[in-house]
Amino acid sequence: MYDYFVIDNFKHLKNYKIVFRKNNEKIWNDVLENLEDAHFWYNNQELNYQKLVRLGEGHEDHDLSFTTLLNDIPISIFAFSISKLKENYQLNSYGRPVLAPLFIKNCSEEIQDKLTETCFKMCENITEKLKIKKWYSNVFFKEKNELCDWVKICENRNFYFHKTFEAYVDLYSVKNDEKILQKKRVFKKVKENLWSHSLLYSLENKEWNKFKLLHLKMAGKKTRSDKTWESQLNDINNKKGFVVFLYDKLNNLVGGNYYRYEKNSAVYAIGVNDRNLFPKPISHYSFYFGIKELSKKNVKWLLLGDIPRSEDFNHPSDKEISIGVFKKKCVQTYLLN
């Protein structure tokens, strides 16, 4: 419906071609495979999952994410969407600030400059046509690309980009030094056999529903649609994720974590534990087994998620901020560096 917004802005570039992600997820994934260190939020499974989450919240999202080809060779991806809630339009990446474009290794600076400028102008044109008063961009800071072209454009135009603070665990450190885990208090608790556990790459609906019901009980309400839970179960059974379940002495499910993973990164997607067992370290207990499993798979980074701050653009709740504090403690438990 809104594809012409992208196509019109790329007409002036000779030898370039646009392929929308919604029409060809494989070619999008091919570019990700050629990136040195792509953030998990760019993965097909994550973007598709966020679309389901947003749909359940009443948002009408139109995915305009696309791969750019130069002389039929994929060289870049740009993830963004136009969203509509009631009569108001937004420019984002499925609820997150617009993600900066990414380029394959050995892509020349000249090409990167040209495409970055084109993508930014396109966003400006869309916001003007749809009368969007504000839009935000997201940059994941790493030492080598703090001054990437996208950031330079934002700074030169006094444009606000959102600095995302996130909690990561460096899984290479865990893999290369088992003592990192053994020195931790949680390791001693694991040896005490407080709970039994299972690590699963395939699940029946019955098992998954027990986890879902525990989440509902602890949250006190239904937080997202059944379709999102179905999507996550499919990811597990398609070997794109796994769960760690914890059981008490009577074999009752008392907690667990669900992880999704790609080539070099993973995300802690769900965690729920019986609060009646606090302050025992049940949450760290399931993290222990998840981290060990991911390190065996040569996954480099485990993303625990955002660490919200009260001054963030989307005004996070006190609960979201407290969850961020928990994530920081997890990083401290397992040593980030």
Image (cartoon, rainbow, N blue to C red):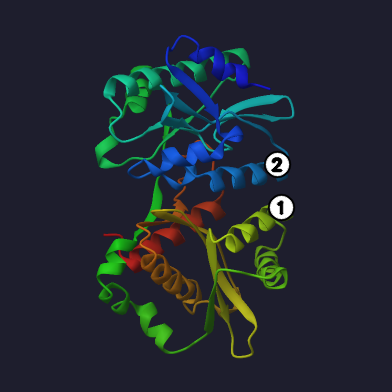
Q: Which mark is residue 227?
A: 1
Which residue, given by chain and number where applicable, does mark 2 sit on? 55
Query: Where residue 176 sits: x, y (%)?
Result: 25, 68
Residue at x 69% of width, y 72% of height: 210
The residue type indicated by label 2 comes to Leu
Residue drawn where x is 48% and y is 21% of the image: 17
Q: Residue furthest top?
A: 12
In the image, is residue 5 above or below residue 52? above
Residue depicted at 54% across the width and 61% down the height:
239
Q: Determine contact: label 2, label 1, CB under 8 Å.
A: yes
Q: CA distance from mark 2 to mark 1?
A: 10 Å
Judge the density around disc 2: few (<14), some (14-19), many (≥20) Cα neighbours within 10 Å: some
Comes first in the chain, label 2 or label 1:
2
Query: Is residue 233 positioned above or below 285 on the image?
Result: above
Q: Is residue 267 left or right of residue 49?
A: left
User: Which of 112 and 18 lies nearest the eye of the viewer?
Assistant: 18
Is residue 258 visible in the rendered image? The answer is: no
